Image: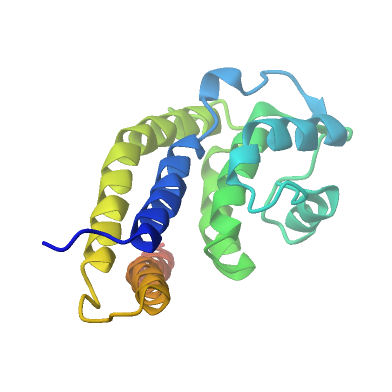
Amino acid sequence: MAAKSDKQLETEESLMGLINKMKEIDYIDPEIIPDIELYMDQVTTFMDLHLGACRRTSEEKVLTKTMINNYTKNDVLPPPIKKKYSKDHMCLLILLYYFKNVLSIDDIQKIFHPLKEMFYDDKSKSISIDEIYAQIFTMEKKMTDKLTKDVLRRFQTSQEMFCDVKDDDEKDYLSRFAFICLLSFDAYLKKQMVERLIDDTLADM
């Protein structure tokens, strides 16, 4: 096997750094979500503090006041009580943060409406919103390592492509492009599955 060029090694180091950074992207542990009511500024500060690793740039805001107000206006999020947000609000907002990067506001509204109707602020139910969030958090924590390994396999596959390209700059670009394509196609398929699940769920209700 031919020795890797300096450009190839630099590319691998750069992309491996991106893959390792995935491990910094974490869900908010249910134990640290405040069990007291918070004002809007406290909510946005908490989100920025604990979801900061998810931001693309340091200037990007995790959730702004405008976003939260729009979610309330669109009946995605229950309105605050006397301008204060409960632990249930916080759990829903955290889930909203992840959904908004993948789904349309209409789809989010569709899956959140039954969740609010059945479980929000209803002490008679056998499970609460924060307990639902806690179980999802536990599941996602277990999946993180598997997801990271899957991305690493795709990265290694992309590095093995275009071996016949002689120019290092061209090969570097094509390897990165292949990696982006592999990740994008995977994301596309999963998004298609989620959208169909949403449609099927509503059809069953």
Q: Residue furthest left?
A: 1
Q: Residue 186's image quarter? A: bottom left
Instruction: Decide if residue 74 is on the left or right side of residue 124.
Output: right
| Count of marks overlaid on the render | 0
Instruction: Decide if residue 144 is on the left or right side of residue 73.
Output: left
Which of 175/9 is in front? 9
Give the residue drawn at x 27%, y 81%.
165
Quarter of the picture holding the N terminus:
bottom left
Give the residue drawn at x 47%, y 27%.
131
| Residue 156 in picture, x, y percent from top left | 24, 58
Q: Residue 160's image quarter? A: bottom left
| Residue 104 in picture, x, y percent from top left | 59, 69
Quarter of the picture holding the C terminus:
bottom left
Display colour scheme:
rainbow
Instruction: Decide if residue 4 is on the left or right side of residue 51.
Output: left
Give the residue drawn at x 74%, y 51%.
60
| Residue 103 in picture, x, y percent from top left | 54, 65
Which of 149/7 is in front? 7
Q: Residue 43's image quarter? A: top right
Which of 168/59 is in front? 168
Give the residue drawn at x 31%, y 47%.
147
| Residue 190 in picture, x, y percent from top left | 35, 65
